[in-house]
Image: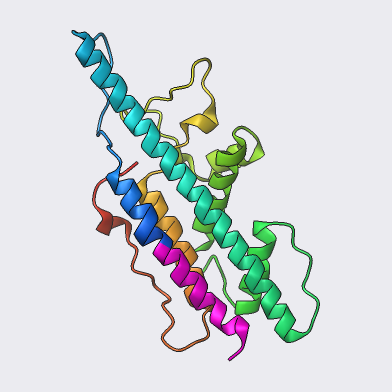
Amino acid sequence: MQTKDQLPRIFQANLARLFEQVIQPAMEALPVHASLECGEAATMDEFLDRAAAQVDNYTANEAAKAFTLTLAGIFERQLSIWARAVYLDLAIEMPKARGFQEFLAICAERAGINVQQTGVGSDLNEMFMVANVVRHGEGSSCEKLMAIAPMLWDDASNDYHDLLAGPRIPSEHLRIRMRDLVRYIWATTRFWGLADPLPMAVTDPPYRVEARGGESA
C-alpha cells in the first residue's frame, strides 16, 4: 500500500476527531442568547446582565470564526502533504502551488473529483475566504465573501452587537454559526472520503445542519 493511498483516510479521521472532540463540545459549552435586549435599563443589575449577554454572543462568534480559521489551516496543510505524496509516488514534478485554491485544484484533479458536482466546492471556498477575513479583516477577501455569502452578514438580527467603538467595520459583523461549522466539516471530510481509494471509504460524512438543533453562534 502506497503512502498516498493512506493519507486521505488519515486526514478525514483527524478532522473528524478535531470537530467531535474539540470544536463541537467547545461551541456547545458557550453561553448564547437568542436575543439581546436594548434600550434603557431599569437597574444597574439589568444593565450589567444585558452587557454580559452581549459579550457572551460576541465571544461565541469569535470562537466560531477562530475554529473556521483552524479548519481551513489544517485542510490546506493536508492538501499540501497529499499533493506532494502523490507526485512523489508518480515520480513527476508537482506543479507550483502558492496557496489553498491551487492545492485544492491539484488534489481534486489527481483524485478525479469535481468539487462543484460533489457539493463541496462552494463550502470549501467560503471556508477559506472566511479564514482570510478572520486573519486580515477588511480587504478583497471580505468584499468577495460578502458577494458570494451575504447570509454571513445579518444586520437585521437582534442577537449580536459588535463591541468595537467607532464606525461600522464589515469584517467585524461577519457571523459564523454552528450550522456553518457543520457545513465546513462536512465539506472537508467529504473531500477526503471521495479521494480515499481504500475499501469502505466514507464519502458522505455524518454531519447535518438539521441534526444539530439550535444555534450555537
Residue at figure coordinates x 48%, y 21% from the top left? 164
Main secondary structure of the magenta stretch: helix
Looking at the picture, how far across and down is residue 29, in whole percent? 28, 45
Q: Is residue 119 something one can see in this rendering?
A: no
Query: In what quadrant of the picture does the C terminus appear?
Result: top left
Q: Please tell me which residue lies in front, 105 or 32.
A: 32
Looking at the picture, how far across and down is residue 149, in whole percent? 49, 44
In the image, residue 28 lies in the stretch drawn in magenta: no
Residue at figure coordinates x 69%, y 62% from the top left? 102
Residue at figure coordinates x 57%, y 55% from the top left? 73
Looking at the picture, how far across and down is residue 183, in whole percent? 41, 57
Q: Residue furthest left?
A: 42
Quarter of the figure with residue 75: bottom right
**Vertical comparison of 195 with 26: above or below:** below
**Vertical comparison of 104 with 92: above or below:** above
Q: Please tell me which residue lies in front, 209 or 16.
A: 16
Left or right, residue 217 beside residue 122: left
Magenta-colored span? 1-17
Residue at figure coordinates x 48%, y 49% from the top left? 68
Left or right, residue 74 beside residue 49: right
In the image, residue 4 lies in the stretch drawn in magenta: yes
Query: In what quadrant of the picture does the N terminus appear?
Result: bottom right
Left or right, residue 14 beside residue 3: left
Left or right, residue 206 beside residue 130: left
Q: Please tell me which residue lies in front, 108 or 18.
A: 18
**Vertical comparison of 34 with 97: above or below:** above
